[in-house]
Image: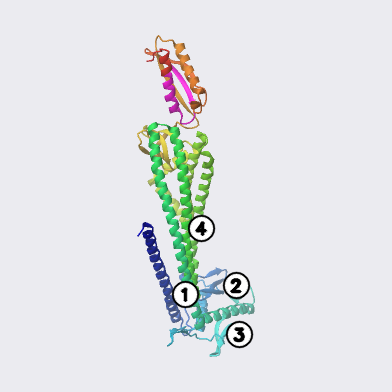
Amino acid sequence: MSGNALLDSSCWRMLKGRLVKAIAVSLLSFGLTIMLSITWASATSAQVPPTLKPTTSPQSERTGVEHLGNIEVAPIKLDGQTLFKVASPTVLNGDEQVDQIPVEVRANRIEENLNRIIGNNAIRLSSSYRIETSTAYDLETLKVYVGRLNNTTTIFARDDTHPLPFPLLTVTQSDAEYWGMPIDQVATFMQEKVEQHLHQALEERTTIHLSLQIFKAVLVTLGILIGSVVLCLFGKLLRQRDKLLKVQQANEAKETSAISSQLLDENDPALQRLNALQRQKYQSTLERQRSLISLLNWFLIWAYLILWIGGILFIFSLFPWTKPLVWIILSLPIKLLGICFVIGLINLLIDALLNMLEKAWNGHQIVGSEDEQRKSLRLTTTINVLKDSKMVAIYLIAVIWGISVLGAPVASILAASGLLVVALSFSFQNLVKDLITGFLILWEDQFAIGDTIAIQNLSDHLVSGLVENMNLRITQLRDLKGCLITIPNSTITQVQNMTRGWSQVDFSIEIAHGADIDQAIAVIQNATQQMFVEEDWSDSMVTLPHVLGIDSISQSGLVIRVLLRTKPAQQWKVEREFRRRVLVALSEQSIAIV
């Protein structure tokens, strides 16, 4: 069997295994949903009391109650869905004012009355293995109407099997105050809501409707299964592409490392900077492609979540006993997931915008002047720092947002967090100093990746080399020996940037006593002019070299000094060539040097 055949067989076995797992998970989810529905139905039915019993609620456990002046408001729910709200006079102390019923107790009694209409909704299998259900009141003959009971407006319910009117709730003056309508209009509004939702609840518990909902649940489960397989295949393609790009990055890193070692041996900072820029451009291209794959993977993960959570919520919404779970999940967990989605999307979009900015800048700056190349590398450094900084800021916002959704006092938590940050800052003083110093280095543009610098630390130790990497915390230099030196930013006391804007060669040569000094100066001047006009060297020099003349006199000889201004990172190459030319020219004229 060929290698491709083996690979195809392996991929098929992997895909088949994932398919079997997806089917098993889907069937298990569907089975659990049905079992949960039946269990929830039995538990709900068991909780409905056969007769009305007054209940009391402690003042400290009055959840869901809104205080509006002299009245309190509580929602009326059926199968987890809010029908409307009822009101009662404010109860300041439920233990003392026994003549007034707290609004949550009234709401609980109304919900118990509504559940009595449904009754103990039993679910059983017939001898022919068909699902059968039953309810307390009949769906076809149920009537909900407004009447009078003890001179109060009351909403009743009855059917053919229960001809005696059953009082569901009484409409009070507090209800009229809350709704801002007369009692009769409030009663009509509530009667319509109760009748609509009771008919819906009874219909959802019929055998035909339940069988149809189970069929829908099966179809949804199959849809989840098919969608999971499609997403799985797409995710596999993305992972293969990302693996290929990762291999390309590794190979490029090896090649550029070899080139960097060669340039390091040649001690040519200009070529080192250009190599760093080209390496950064290629790596940035690969990184942008991987970032796009990460973005697609992120959407893929959320597609999985939306598919499964949405499917499970839809299945729960099909059955009246699991509907309350839908509202519970939608109230808090979905909000928190929504925060994660928004924050993650913002984070990825900002990364994409920064990558586009870097691409647009490097697209035309890589072949520009040395200063433009340096700006390009500085922009890359700044973008990398911005990515790290914005991630901290975005997730800090996410935490605060999540705390507010949970209902915790954000102001108090932020105040406590501020005190904690102050306390931790004393423990991590050096880290804070590193971050602040790193920010100032970037802000003031003291140096950037690709610059050749000399750094003096707190111990007055001088370290020089090419800046290979930097962030807010550390700076890494590569010296002439090839050593990578890592320096915390807080220890930097002085920086000598030898490749910023322009560079200069400070050349001195000592002529022996007795030599013709004017001739020596003329020879050196002629060497500088010839070098400046040559095409190979004119691009590296900014202005015509300036021969200062005799800089000092000693017992051994006379020192002639020359200044050659060059482009950034070109001074070492120019100095080596100029030194060679001067020695050759003086030797040809038999001028002795010391």
| Amino acid, disc 1 | Val
The residue to which callout 2 is attached is 178
Q: CA distance from mark 1 to mark 2?
A: 44 Å
Q: CA distance from mark 3 to mark 2?
A: 21 Å
Residue mark closest to the camera, 4 vs 2: 4
The residue to which callout 3 is attached is 147
Numbered circle sitting on residue 157: none
Residue at disc 1, secondary structure: helix
The residue to which callout 4 is attached is 342
Q: CA distance from mark 4 to mark 1?
A: 32 Å
Q: CA distance from mark 1 to mark 3?
A: 45 Å
- Determine if residue 367 is in view: yes
Indicate the position of residue 214 as horizontal and vertical percent values.
48, 77
- Residues drawn in magenta: 559-582
Quarter of the picture holding the N terminus: bottom left
Disc with the residue nearer the chain's start (1 vs 3): 3
Q: Nearer the viewer, residue 90 or 282?
A: 282
